[in-house]
Amino acid sequence: MKESLMEIPCKNNHYFQNWSQTYSCKPELYFEPRCTDDLRVILLEAKQLKKKVKVVGGGLSPSDIACTNHFMISMKLFNKILEIDKTNCVITVESGVTIYQLNNHVLPSNGLALSNMGSVSGQCVGGIIGTGTHGTGGNFGSFASCVLEVTFMISDGSIIKCSKEKNGELFQAVCCHLGLLGIILVVKIQCEPAFKLHLKQASGLLEDNLVDLKSLISQSQHFRFFWFPHTGSSESVRRSDRVFTFDCLFKQYVTEWAIPQQNTVTVLRKMREWIIANSHVKVHFPVEVRFVKQDGIMLAPSGDEDVTYIGIISFRPYGKIVPHDEWWNFFENLATEYGGKPHWAKAHKVKADDFRRMYPKFDRFMEIRRQLDPTCMFWNDYWRRVMGKDGFHMVAPEKQRL
Ligand SMILES: Cc1cc2nc3c(=O)[nH]c(=O)nc-3n(C[C@H](O)[C@H](O)[C@H](O)COP(=O)(O)OP(=O)(O)OC[C@H]3O[C@@H](n4cnc5c(N)ncnc54)[C@H](O)[C@@H]3O)c2cc1C
């Protein structure tokens, strides 16, 4: 068993950049550990040296939520499939396994498929349950609603396993862990028998969708729409994962908010009015609109109610800085006015007090976090910005033992 940091291969000149190339950092030390002993040594030494630790998955988060200038741990070597239970359609995988790996090398050959997923597949399992990642479908919660059990290492190096049945409150917290509770090691996921999806794509007027929105959401399993003009119609049947994912094309700024589903029509109409009234602003498209069912996960935007995710983008040709503030500010203010919550992974300016208003259990989550990680080892600039200087010392009004 390794006992010191010197025995674990690491780099001191690693440059990390997120997929969108909007944030980067130069961690003091970058590790690609192979086993839980390595992880434990890193955490214990980090504690002694008073270093922060950030785990990175696929690096897809458009914000700086995975950045750090202290110790960065990549879970790319934690990429084993531990168990495939074909009878119950349950897989147990290490947290560095990517959705791509599952879709292409694991699930089809075992007659299985994930029930739902986001629009891309480069995320790791540990990362996808880190930010409330979601697909679309009126009867589907965020991705983590398919998670049955999570095993993770907390800041003192001990390992905790939780599920709905065992340590249920902690499980609800860890299903949208925000990189704050520990290092996700193993995740058990409920899959289903492989299926095909009948993909129907049609162009139409935004207003037609809005008028008929409720029935459109309930008529298809995975209704979503992209708001942009001049598309032709098409229809095809393809393997499920190939329908869920698509090519997001170019580097882009992105923000996405979950608003209560009953406010969808009003918000989209107001966005359209604003675009028409502000023709000097070059709004890029598509605007992606997706639907997620209430899933009870403590800090998932879909935790307490059915939500509609509205995502706006601004492409960055040749990596250039493209002005987008005016559109962004309008959209974020509008989403806030109509009860919206930002996607945890995407750029936002929301601070702790607002999150407290948005999430009744925000302080409880932070109290759980404090108990699991009293020295704020998993903190980074993203969290300093959100929590403000008091974040380190924040204690919820009511203390409960885990
Ligand atoms: C082109 C594109 C398309 C996208 N489409 C969607 C979409 O359709 N729906 C959606 O909801 N989101 C979408 N996203 C956002 C993406 O799903 C989330 O950012 C997701 O969290 C990324 O997973 P990752 O493995 O890259 O995690 P990272 O970005 O690497 O990390 C995310 C968070 O998880 C933590 N983390 C990662 N692994 C672990 C671990 N093993 N243990 C502890 N903490 C860990 C990190 O510290 C960080 O806090 C998209 C992003 C891009 C760039």
Image: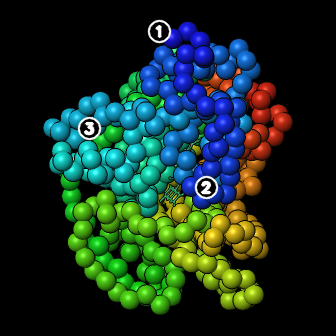
Whether residues under marks 2 and 3 lie with C-beta atoms below 8 angstroms apart, the answer is: no
Callout 3: helix, strand or loop? strand
Q: Amino acid at mark 1?
A: Met
Callout 2: helix, strand or loop? loop
Q: Residue at x 30, y 77 (%)?
A: 200
Residue 194 lies left or right of residue 4; in this view the side is left
Find residue 218 and report its horizontal and vertical position in percent.
Answer: 36, 68
Q: Is residue 154 above or below residue 222?
A: above
Residue 397 lies left or right of residue 110; in this view the side is right
Find residue 111 and report its horizontal and vertical position in percent.
Answer: 17, 48
Q: Is mark 2 within 8 Å of ligand 1?
A: yes
Q: Amino acid at mark 3?
A: Val
Q: Residue at x 38, y 74 (%)?
A: 215
Quadrant of image for the C terminus: top right
Find residue 24 and report its horizontal and vertical position in percent.
Answer: 68, 49
Please give the label number shown on residue 62: 2
Judging by the rendered image, the residue that carries numbered circle 1 is: 1
Distance between the alpha carbons at the discs numbered 2 and 3: 30 Å
Q: Earlier in the sequence, mark 1 or mark 3?
A: 1
Judging by the rendered image, the residue that carries numbered circle 3 is: 90
Distance between the alpha carbons at the discs numbered 1 and 3: 32 Å
Q: Earlier in the sequence, mark 2 or mark 1?
A: 1
Q: Nearer the viewer, residue 134 or 347?
A: 347
